[in-house]
Image (tube, helix red, strand yellow):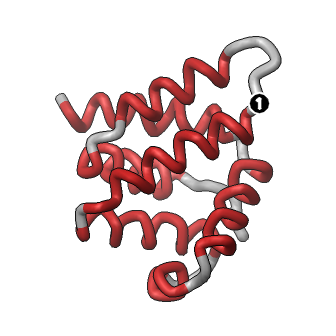
Amino acid sequence: MRKINTEDVFKMARLMKNGNFLQAVKNAYIEGKKEDADAEQIGMGAVMEIMCSCSDARVEIQFYDLLGGICEKKPEEVKVQSFETTVEDIRKILLENDILNFLDSASSLGEKIQS
């Protein structure tokens, strides 16, 4: 697994726009700024909202691409892995990266893309 990079932020911004879940990311960011915030719990809540937005096939493919890139897996691997593995991959991403900075960057880009 690698650190989140600039390309991931742009992929996430497109995913937010196409999945229409910018507000979920904003809410996660606001919650994460509160004192004693549990970044992992907040991040997982946002991720679950994002995954629920992936009912559109195009958004689903973008999700596999984003997660696969960060986890250094092919999108097809992410697509067929167990849900437990996907949740664990996301948990590791949240723990190994500054997720609040990522959400901040992605939500700012998402706002600019929607404009």
Residue underneath mark 1: 38
Q: Quadrant of the C terminus?
A: top left
Please tell me in which quadrant of the rendered image residue 103 appears. Answer: top right
Which type of secondary structure does the marked residue at label 1 adopt?
A: loop
* Residue at position x 53%, y 48% in the image: 47
For residue 115, side relative to residue 11 (left or right): left
- Residue at position x 44%, y 72% in the image: 64
Q: Is residue 52 left or right of residue 57?
A: right
For the point 40% across and 56% down, the residue is: 11
Q: Nearer the viewer, residue 2 or 85?
A: 85
- Which quadrant holds residue 37? top right
Q: Nearer the viewer, residue 94 or 115?
A: 94
Q: Nearer the viewer, residue 65 or 53?
A: 53
Is 87 in front, or is 13?
Answer: 87
- Residue found at the far right of this picture: 36
Q: Is residue 7 above or below residue 22?
A: below
Q: Position of residue 84 (x, y in %)?
A: 67, 71
Amino acid type for the residue under numbered disc 1: Asp
- Residue 50, x across and y down, in percent: 43, 49
